[in-house]
Image (cartoon, helix red, strand yellow):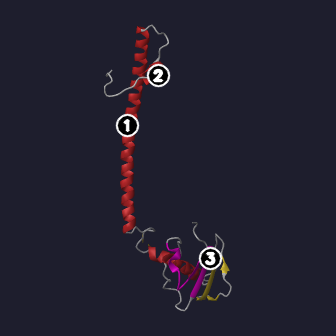
């Protein structure tokens, strides 16, 4: 199922967005720009609310938003807020303030690993180790197989040549030997060669 795309957005009592009577239609890609105080941060806080599933604390208490997706889902400040959790990323002034400590020269990690992600990381590490072990076993087995295949080929060729010389058959080769052995029925009582 494709990820839904925000199609329409209507804001009311949200900073400079006093009453947006006509929803703004968005496209797949949108560039939002404007002067200071034109509502960029307010709009990004609405998107942040959708990405976290909780209305941003800096949005006005009496403000409302209504977001329609291209799959006909409707999200508002009081319903379906968790629909886009994990599917929407917001990089705005709030993100910078929460994650960059300029005076200390430090930054918080962009990605957080919770306990379930740590377990998955451990599983991935374990699987990669198993893969490496299996690759090593495969390489060893393949070298052994190649060596034994060459030894067996040499054995068939020299055995066919010996049989051809003893029976005075000039064109008796390894494929002839393999074909002759294919007609023989083997069981536990068969003689060992």
From where the camera sits, is residue 101 visible? no
Q: Position of residue 67 (x, y in %)?
A: 60, 80
Q: Position of residue 157 (x, y in %)?
A: 43, 18
Q: Residues within 10 Å of mark 3 (few under 14, many from 20)?
A: few
Rendered position, 137 above or below 42:
above
Residue matched to label 1: 141
In the image, which disc is placed on residue 179?
2
The residue closer to the viewer here, 153 or 24, is: 153
Rendered position, 135 above or below 65:
above
The single residue placed furthest to the top in the displayed view is 168
Image quadrant of residue 109?
bottom left
* Mark pair 1, 2: CA separation: 28 Å
Q: Position of residue 43 (x, y in %)?
A: 58, 81
Residue matched to label 3: 72
Q: Residue at x 41, y 26 (%)?
A: 150
Q: Residues within 10 Å of mark 1 (few under 14, many from 20)?
A: few
Q: Secondary structure at mark 1?
A: helix
Tell me which segment is drawn in magenta.
64-85
Question: The N terminus appears in which quarter of the rendering?
Answer: bottom right
Q: Residue at x 39, y 32 (%)?
A: 145
Of mark 1 and mark 2, the one earlier in the sequence is 1
Rendered position, 162 above or below 76:
above
Q: How many numbered discs sit on the rendered protein?
A: 3
Q: Residues within 10 Å of mark 2 (few under 14, many from 20)?
A: few
Q: Residue at x 31, y 28 (%)?
A: 188
In the image, taking residue 30 as reference, residue 156 lies left or right, namely left
Image quadrant of residue 40?
bottom right
Q: Secondary structure at mark 3?
A: loop
* Mark pair 3, 1: CA separation: 56 Å
Q: Secondary structure at mark 2?
A: helix
The residue closer to the viewer here, 156 or 10, is: 156
């Amino acid at each position: 199922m494709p990820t839904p795309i925000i199609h329409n957005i209507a804001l009311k009592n949200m900073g400079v967005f006093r009453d947006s009577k006509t929803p703004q239609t968005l496209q797949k890609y949108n560039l939002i720009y404007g002067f200071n105080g034109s509502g960029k941060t307010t709009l990004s806080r609405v998107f942040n609310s959708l990405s976290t599933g909780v209305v941003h604390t800096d949005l006005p208490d009496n403000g409302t938003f209504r977001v329609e997706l291209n799959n006909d889902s409707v999200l508002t400040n009081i319903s379906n807020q968790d629909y886009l959790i994990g599917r929407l990323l917001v990089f705005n002034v709030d993100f910078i303030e929460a994650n960059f400590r300029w005076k200390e020269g430090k930054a918080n990690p962009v990605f957080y690993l919770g306990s379930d992600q740590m377990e998955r990381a451990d599983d991935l590490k374990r699987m990669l180790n198993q893969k490496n072990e299996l690759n090593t076993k495969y390489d060893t087995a393949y070298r052994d197989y190649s060596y034994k295949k060459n030894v067996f080929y040499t054995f068939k060729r020299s055995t066919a040549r010996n049989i051809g010389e003893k029976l005075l058959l000039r064109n008796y080769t390894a494929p002839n030997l393999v074909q002759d052995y294919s007609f023989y029925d083997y069981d536990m009582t068969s003689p060992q060669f």
